[in-house]
Amino acid sequence: MNQAQNLLHGPEAELDAQFKVRWVDLASERVGGETLACSDDFFAEMENLLKAGRGVFIDDKFTERGKWMDGWESRRSYGRPGARSPETDFDWCIIRLGMAGVIRGFDIDTNYFRGNAPQAVAIEACHSAGQPNADTLWQTLLSKTDVRAHSQNVVAIYDERAFTHVRLKMYPDGGIARFRVYGEVAVDWHDFVDGELIDLASIKNGGQALLVSDMFYSDKNNLIMPERGKNMGDGWETRRRRDPGPDWSIIQLATVGSVEKVLVDTCHFKGNYPDTFSLEGATASGDPLAMAALRADPAALQALDWQPIIGQTKLYAHREHLFIREILVPKEQAFSHIRLSIYPDGGVSRLRVFGKRQALA
């Protein structure tokens, strides 16, 4: 059997690329996404839905329950204990998003589920402070829609509400390899106390990696992910330049705020860490529409009035570098964007930018 991985083409590939560039996966286990419950996962566990990558296929791997599959797979619906009615002819899985947010699209990936993919899916969402229960009011974001076997099924969503949980339904049963929920983080600032130092670059707090000079080896969002990098692939690494550089990454901070402490972590980068780095900041309008327009305009991002925050400074291999006294700007000054430059190239695992949220007028 041909077990080549399916790849997207045409408009759907363009939509998938747009999601990955503009938004983040709110459900990823890397940011705290969690599968809470499902109707059935007899053949393959629901937790697989949120793992990294697209899933793999191993020809001769079986379990006592049948063929091992890298995804969520329920048993065939007929013959199960309890009769089904036409109104409940589906399997379901409830997922707590790692970051509450506005959902912009889904990728329902049935990779390697060739003869056991569902016929259709539907997706609902809710905003709940606690665990969803029988009284939870679910909002339909994607009505029942046919999906293809062994394929990424990418769909855009147009809804401005913020949600904390989603419920994935598959009709009538079957298997899904991975499930991505792309969107933008909606931060509840009541979760922070006045005057608290916040990592304003963190993806969990609403920071966004907008634009980079190069991300040949790894994704730009790795730079602002939670925790320390698990290996060299879990960072931001550029290809080798053949000129003085630098390479750079522009990050929109979670909110306009001060820069009072910076941490640059080259964890796992031992032979390919940058020689030096610098950090700059800029302040753009806090208006949401203006910020959205800026995110979509690379030239305008580059043309912002960038001001030095930390001058060009030496870095070392596989080390956390903390900077406080080196910061050149006063604590009262606020920024909306920062630009990390690395000379001439290389890899950085994490960047933390600690500051205080600017008081709202």
Image (cartoon, rainbow, N blue to C red):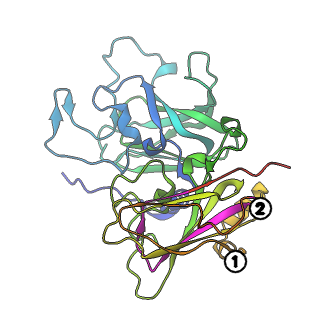
Q: Quadrant of residue 336?
A: bottom right
Could you say whether the residue bearing mark 2 is in a helix, strand or loop? helix
Q: Image height check: is 235 above or below 151? A: below
Q: Which residue is at the front of the view, 241 or 24? A: 241
User: Which residue appears farthest toward the front when viewing the image?
Assistant: 325
Residue 249 sits in quarter: bottom right
Residue type (three-letter) at the residue carrying disc 1 = Ala
* Secondary structure at numbered mark 1: loop
Locate residue 52, reporting x and y percent: 38, 48
Q: CA distance from mark 1 to mark 2?
A: 15 Å
Which disc is residue 77 wearing?
Answer: none
Of 115 and 31, the residue lying toward us: 31
Image vertical order of residue 38 relative to residue 227, above or below: above
Residue 282, percent across and down? 70, 68
Q: Is residue 32 above or below residue 80?
A: below
Query: In terms of secondary structure, what is the magenta stretch mainly?
Result: strand
The reply to whether residue 12 is visible in this rendering is no
- List the residue tagged with mark 2: 290
User: Residue at the location (23% across, 53% down)?
Assistant: 3
Sequence-wise first label, 1 or 2: 2
Q: Which residues are magenta?
A: 332-352
* Mark 1–mark 2 CB contact (< 8 Å): no
**Which residue is identified by label 1?**
303
Q: Residue at x 32, y 31 (%)?
A: 45
Horizontal relation, residue 305 to residue 9: left or right = right
Is the residue 232 above or below the residue 160 in the image? below
- Residue 60 rendering spot, x and y as whole percentages: 13, 42
